[in-house]
Image (cartoon, coloured by chain):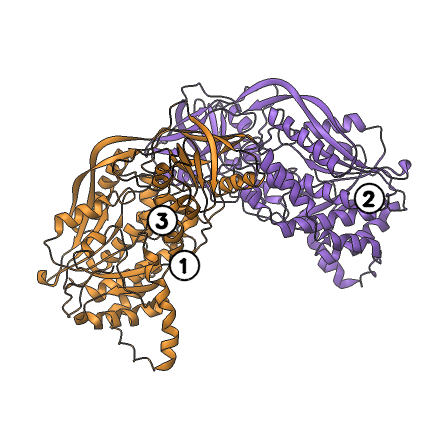
Chain colours: A orange, B purple
Amino acid sequence: MMKHTLAVLAASTLSVPLMAQRTAPPAPAPVDAKVAALRDAALKDDVAYDIVEGMTTEIGPRLAGTEAEARARAWSVTKLKALGFKNVRIEPYQMPVWVRGVETGSILSPFPQALKLTALGNSGATPVGGLTAQVVVFKTYGDLAAAPAGSLAGKIAYVGNAMEPTQDGSSYGAFGPARFVGPAMAASKGAAAIVIRSIGTDHHRNPHTGTTNFPEGVTPIPSAALSVPDAELIERIATRGKPITMTLVLTPRMTGTHESGNVIAEVPGTDPKAGIVLVGGHLDSWDLGTGAIDDASGVAITAAAAKRILDGPRPRRTIRVVWFGAEEVGGFGGKAYAEAHKTERHATAGESDFGADRVWRFETNLPDSAKPVGDRLASALAPLGIARGAGVGGDGTDVGPIMALGVAAIDLNQSGTRYFDTHHTPDDTLDRVDPEQLRQNVAAWTTMLAIVANAPEEIGSVVPRK
Amino acid sequence: MMKHTLAVLAASTLSVPLMAQRTAPPAPAPVDAKVAALRDAALKDDVAYDIVEGMTTEIGPRLAGTEAEARARAWSVTKLKALGFKNVRIEPYQMPVWVRGVETGSILSPFPQALKLTALGNSGATPVGGLTAQVVVFKTYGDLAAAPAGSLAGKIAYVGNAMEPTQDGSSYGAFGPARFVGPAMAASKGAAAIVIRSIGTDHHRNPHTGTTNFPEGVTPIPSAALSVPDAELIERIATRGKPITMTLVLTPRMTGTHESGNVIAEVPGTDPKAGIVLVGGHLDSWDLGTGAIDDASGVAITAAAAKRILDGPRPRRTIRVVWFGAEEVGGFGGKAYAEAHKTERHATAGESDFGADRVWRFETNLPDSAKPVGDRLASALAPLGIARGAGVGGDGTDVGPIMALGVAAIDLNQSGTRYFDTHHTPDDTLDRVDPEQLRQNVAAWTTMLAIVANAPEEIGSVVPRK
């Protein structure tokens, strides 16, 4: 997963080239030789790939709150201790758990065909024998929203989208509402069920799951994503003008409250008062794939970078690596972390949760006192092909709650052009990870940690990004 | 599907450039202006795409011998009549029918993970409750073949392969035996079941089905293909040196003898003694996808080309378009056609069954009397980017039986670099068809028909390609 709001500031970057033409840019900050050496050595990193390979091979899918996620936590503790991290521990919390059941669907008429679909997280269930109803086709979420009250009574709503890949992931924010809130919208108009075109940019018969949200008091309706080719089939049939009848069998269920947890490891710093540098990703994954890019890569990248600092002189600031639990299904791990650690001083926070492709941009939300830190990051990251964006940093479901308390943000943005081909599908497997691009990520995070954890400047609190 | 022996003559093409340096090439045959006009007009064809769109939307999967294939035949008769073809008819035959059942599998130890797999055609069944056994890992079919007699007693054999894409499809012949005969080989050594790495070149969680063959007297064992990422998972686990236990549930079954059929349509010629020009593809498809590239495209391309001749002056030779039934599961339609029509004079035969990407090469098996026909084809096809290969034509499961009787062959070879990404998977859907490349195919087949159906030369029988 990634935060829905990545898109917010993308447009503002457009003004930078124009400004640059008018005033000569300031001289770049010099790059510390030790930072450069750490950065360049990280381009040969093998630790991150080893973590991704191990987690996908030895654990595989790890749905939040299930025994698979618990196995993943145990595996992670062993791995992080073996790497030499300090204070390795699990911080448990309780959460409601949703699990998938049977999921099949077919068009019955006018042209009988089986469909490839998958339930959305928090979906309600059909009767065990299935639900059969006429389909009302909406090409966009906007069309669904415009449907009259009560007009979907007893019907299955279909909602399409025209999502295309974007490097900054902004199309997810633009087209994702069909999944995020489409089911609740359809329920409010009386729909018996909803199927959406997957929020994805590929053309494979692998539907994209993900959570949907029903407000308190609204009974969840059966809610599924069709693979993109299946969605296109529905839309082609709709052009023929004949009524479409569909049958769905979806038997997911809530299993009650169960334990999940965050796995924490540290590189202790020399100056406890300077604040913690928090980095991480999420340990849980959707159940369809093995969570290679979402988010074994993120936990691997941040841990591999921290390991490079661990193996050198002790940094000024403590680096805390958190492998968050239960991100996909509602960010329970991030909320639990913020609640448990809100009284500790954090200098910065940043998470890696947008795959394994190269970092192309960084953005920060640093206090004025730490402006030189951002300038040093710009110089040191540039050789990796990473440019400073014009926006304000603050991405991340897991670090969001702690950043909301005023912790400074450092975002290292990965290139997302391939991300939504695979996101939340069975295809999220090890082969999706390009080892060279993964190493570039490790180099970027190593560079960031080397600069930020040792920065002599005060890094105090900030006004959180909206 | 495509014939397994496409590869046979590929190596001989290497000598052509060397020869060309030694002797000046002969002047190309002139191109008839009417042929050129037909060819160029076909580059704007919409008939072929309309057929593929219709067949995938209104019928979808059409497994041989099932009611879905029967629906496809009825649809085809309506379509071919609407296009104005003559003598449109179904020629039925009987065949044994295999159907898929439940198919699930998991690794139980050392690392529990669910697997994506699909039964191979003719696979045997496990008990309904499943079959659990230790896995013996073979990286290649050769390794399996080298296993001692009896060494697989009670085990599940895993067989890998290292297939990569090739333009001429030759890697299918090279690596396909793991599927074609691997199950029978494993059964002969006592295996309880077999799983193979899909014969495919993609990395998606969509396994590639296809037939496997058990000799008379050998009881079929449960036989499945894993998706490529799942196969890689097995091989990664194997490197850890711990025993692998797998459970499989496969419940396919033979349903007895049922009706299938060939759909035939004609463009009548003026000279019955000149022989029939036979073209076509296959109407049936595997059940996982909608058979867009395999082989709605082939039937569409050949029919769209024939339609262009139909709409002009009557040709010398009758063009017969056959949409063969039951190709995938054993070439029943092609055999039935040859048996029914063996006494009719055929001038040439050619089929389109290698997807929808552009034609890059043509090869013939023409009698000496018709050598100028080949020369005219070379000149007229060159503007489409199609070169004459150095091999002897004769591809095709469906036209194979009639060619075996001495009918001359004209092959228009499609580029296969993407074909085995999709072949026999759920991903064989309309979006795989590039309309521009489909049109180039129609232009190539139109050009061929315009030349061959009107050739004044005698086109007599030939010695079939081995």
Nearer mark to the viewer, of 1 and 2 = 1
Query: Chain letter of disc 3?
Result: A
Query: Chain letter of disc 1?
Result: A
Residue A2 lies left or right of residue B54; in this view the side is left
Q: Residue A445, labelled with which disc?
A: none
Q: Position of residue A116 (x, y in %)?
A: 47, 35
Q: SS of the residue at dot 1?
A: loop
Do pointers 1 and 3 mark residues of a single chain? yes
Question: Which residue corresponds to mark 1?
Answer: A167
Q: SS of the residue at dot 3?
A: helix
Residue B81 lies left or right of residue B209; in this view the side is right
Residue A378, quarter of picture: bottom left
Q: Residue B366, labelled with which disc?
A: 2
Question: Which residue corresponds to mark 3?
Answer: A293
Seen at 26% across and 43% down, the residue is A330
Amino acid at pointer 2: Leu
